[in-house]
Amino acid sequence: MKPRLLYSAVFFLAICVSGAPLGAQWLDYRVPGVPRNADGKVNISAPAPKAADGKPDLSGVWESGNDYFLDLSKDLKPGELAMLPWAKKVQAEREARDHRDDPLNQCMPPGVPRINMTTANAPHPLKIVQTPALVVLLYETSANSTFRQVFLDGRPLPKDPQPTWLGYSVGHWTGGTLVVDTVGFNGRSWVDTAKGHPQTESAHVTERFTRRDFGHMEMDITIDDPGAYEKPWRAVVPFHLLADTDLIETYCENEKDSVHEGR
Amino acid sequence: MKRLIQVFLVAAPAFAQWLNYPTPGLPRLPDGQPNLTAPAPRTADGKPDLSGVWNRISPRYHINIAGDLKPEEVQPWARDLVAQRTENLGKDNMTVLCLPLGPAYATDADGTDGGMMKIIQTPGLIVILNPDLTYRQIFMDGRPLEKSPNPSWMGYSVGHWDSDTLVVESFGFNDRTWLDSSGHPHTEALRMTERYRRRDIGHLDLEVTLQDPAVYSRAWTVAVRAELAPDTELLEFVCNENPGLREHWVGKASDDTKSDVKVPPEVLAKYVGTYVEQPKLWRVVPRVVTITLSDGILFGEMDGRGKERQYARSEKDFSGFRGLAIEFIKNSQGEVTDLLVKHVSGDYRFARQR
């Protein structure tokens, strides 16, 4: 596993200030309780740990496989993703305009599921903080650091929610998998970045988290958005653990961004 | 006159998204209301459990973090900077620029939106979530603070338990944030210590000690309290949704003093009294404005922040609450019954107490 460096969070058009040069803030701190090989390296194929309540413990800093941030549909076969005509038109325009209309460039939250994804140019991992009744997802993003709450206390999804960028999330365990259902989006965020697949207020996103072993997790995503797609579509995204490191703060500075927008 | 002062355009309409969902696990009275004086809960490891949604309440230090310091204990350049920022009505405040408050999340505790936070406690890590989608991580795994951290908006925090008190040490803030809405500055050398004690289910006492010798000649401690916000949740607030806000931020604090209209003392005397906000906002405690008269000069005090002189715009309209206007309302008998506090998000009614 390569050590994590501070990137100055420059992603295409979005200029965000992460505060910058290399400094030593726990980016190489040896986290206690991690299984290690004789040479001190993390044993990534050790079994997945369990939480006190017996559930798989997803806690940790995770990084997605590359480029689902750019194109969440990249592994799909033809026909598996079927956009409604308006959505096809909008998606083509966004791609043709080199995604300069992406709200992420105006420092808005990236939306769900895009917020989970990273790309080689600007790696932004996520951190899972797990408790029995609430899972918190902490994020670096190409815009601001932000978070999501996933309620596991049995509450139902809200019926007529005030639309938001990140929606409202509830979760439950099915065997060894954490199933997170999210609704209540404002319809303004993009599903991915280079492709610009649209999302509407009717989107229902399901993320199924399965920790295969100590170092590997899978996020099986279903996007059910009858406002934009003829049928639900799916992406299975691998994640790997980043051990002995932590998130880096990312905050966007508006005025700088608008200057660098490059219209 | 519509001048902006408290930034956060009120972002919380009363829709049904868990803003009134019963918090699971809260002890309740027979009528179903939460029993906010029940003993503080404990976690499986026996520590007090600070988890929950809280409203910080600290009107005094939100306005002036250095209120307990003598003027000469603040460097002259810093006093000048505060005067300049106050005169500019806080135009360059982080909340206007959509940037994090940094260390001020601990003491920023007032205003129509302010002070809500959610604490999530695990044995190795405590997370504090804020409605503006910023968060703090407080590492409880025994790691030491970094000696020369890369400066950041939110700083780096480690915590430990001192009996039933959570002690959080923070360092590594950048020097771009203000410690209060008046604009008290700090340097990258700032060290902050917070001591959290959950008195009972409903009450959290917080002492914040600030140390920054380049600006303040001694360390000092301010007390903030927080009340549990039961049966509700944080609601996403994205500051960057209102990018043009700063352009509308016009005027100077001293403008208030320039158009003082003479109002007869017998008229001013009718305004003296205590006014309580009705209906209260979603805060636990309603806001209170106290109007007093001294040597023919009208003063207003909101939530114990300290008396502020009110300058007359007309016989019934005044300003002086840092850009907020107030208007006294009479009934048909000519008795003063209400006071309106005028904010960019609308007028807020305060009923006169009898």
Image: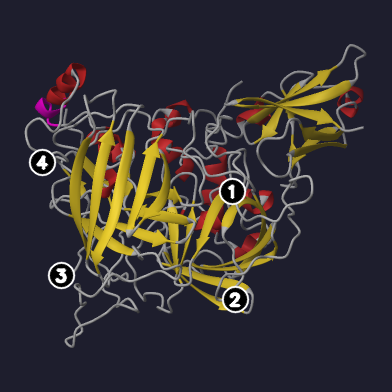
Residue denoted by label 2: B46
Of the two numbered discs 4 and 3 in the rendering, the one whose residue sits closer to the viewer: 4
Q: Distance between the residues labelled 1 and 4?
A: 43 Å
Q: Residue furthest left?
A: A78
- The disc, 4 or 3, on the residue closer to the chain's N-terminal end is 3
Q: Name the residue under label 4.
A: A74
Query: Which residues fall within the magenta stretch?
Result: A94-98
**B269 or B61, which is in the foreground?**
B61
At horizontal 74% and vertical 54% (from top left) the residue drawn is B35
| In this rendering, position of residue B133 left or right of residue B300 | left
Name the disc covering residue A1, or none: 3
SS class, disc 2: loop
* Residue B184 seen in the current view: no
Report whether B99 appears left or right of B331: left
Q: In which quarter of the image is residue B297?
A: top right
As helix, strand or loop, the secondary structure at mark 4 comes to loop
Q: Distance between the residues labelled 3 and 2?
A: 37 Å
Which amino acid type corresponds to the residue marked 2 in the rendered image?
Gly
Q: Nearer the viewer, residue A2 or B289?
A: A2
Residue B308 is inside the magenta segment = no
